[in-house]
Amino acid sequence: MKFLAMCSTGLGSSFMVRMNIETIVRELGLADVAVEHSDISSAGPGSADVFFVAKDLEDAAQGLGDVVVLNSIIDMDELRDAVKSAAARHGLL
């Protein structure tokens, strides 16, 4: 299972979200989840099982598959809920 955090350049915000997702994945004990980050233009439907993007990239992420749109990329509670929901959708919880 792969979670992919994406931003427009694949550098700052996607890396920060990736690190936060990794923390949550460890908290939840999801051993079979790999977390990566990327720029959105490099991602395709087969790049990950779940894609995490900020609200401003919602339209660009259409067609990728299971896309989680974050209203705030710094809100850990929102991200924790999003990771839990994604894990549940994919039978990990």
Image (tube, helix red, strand yellow):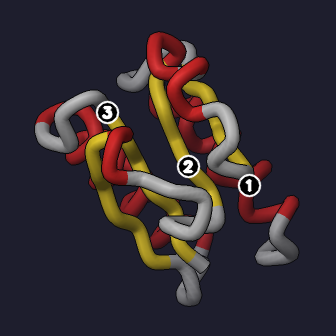
Helix or strand or loop: what does disc 1 sit on? helix
Task: List x then y, in percent, for residue 30.
Answer: 60, 78
Circle 3 is placed at which residue position? 7
Circle 1 is placed at which residue position? 86
Query: Which numbered disc, 3 or 1, marks the residue that appears first in the sequence?
Result: 3
Query: Which numbered disc, 2 or 3, marks the residue that appears first in the sequence?
Result: 3
Residue drawn at (40%, 24%) of the image: 73
Helix or strand or loop: what does disc 2 sit on? strand
Q: What separation in Å lies between label 2 and label 3 (alpha carbons)?
A: 10 Å
Circle 2 is placed at which residue position? 51
Mark 1–mark 2 CB contact (< 8 Å): no
Quadrant of the frame with the C terminus: bottom right
The correct choice, above or below, for 18 with respect to 81 in the image is below
Residue drawn at (65%, 37%) of the image: 68
Task: List x then y, in percent, for residue 56.
Answer: 46, 11
Query: Which numbered disc, 1 or 2, marks the residue that appears first in the sequence?
Result: 2
The correct choice, above or below, for 74 with respect to 14 in the image is above
Q: Nearer the viewer, residue 64 or 69?
A: 64
Residue drawn at (57%, 88%) of the image: 32
Task: List x then y, in percent, for residue 31.
Answer: 54, 87
Amino acid type of the residue tagged 3 in the rendering: Cys
Q: What separation in Å lies between label 1 and label 2 (alpha carbons)?
A: 10 Å
Amino acid type of the residue tagged 2 in the rendering: Phe
Mark 3–mark 1 CB contact (< 8 Å): no
Position of 75 with respect to 62 (left or right) is left
Indicate the quadrant where residue 81 lies. top right
Which numbered circle lies on residue 26? Answer: none
The correct choice, above or below, for 71 with respect to 90 in the image is above
Quadrant of the frame with the N terminus: bottom right
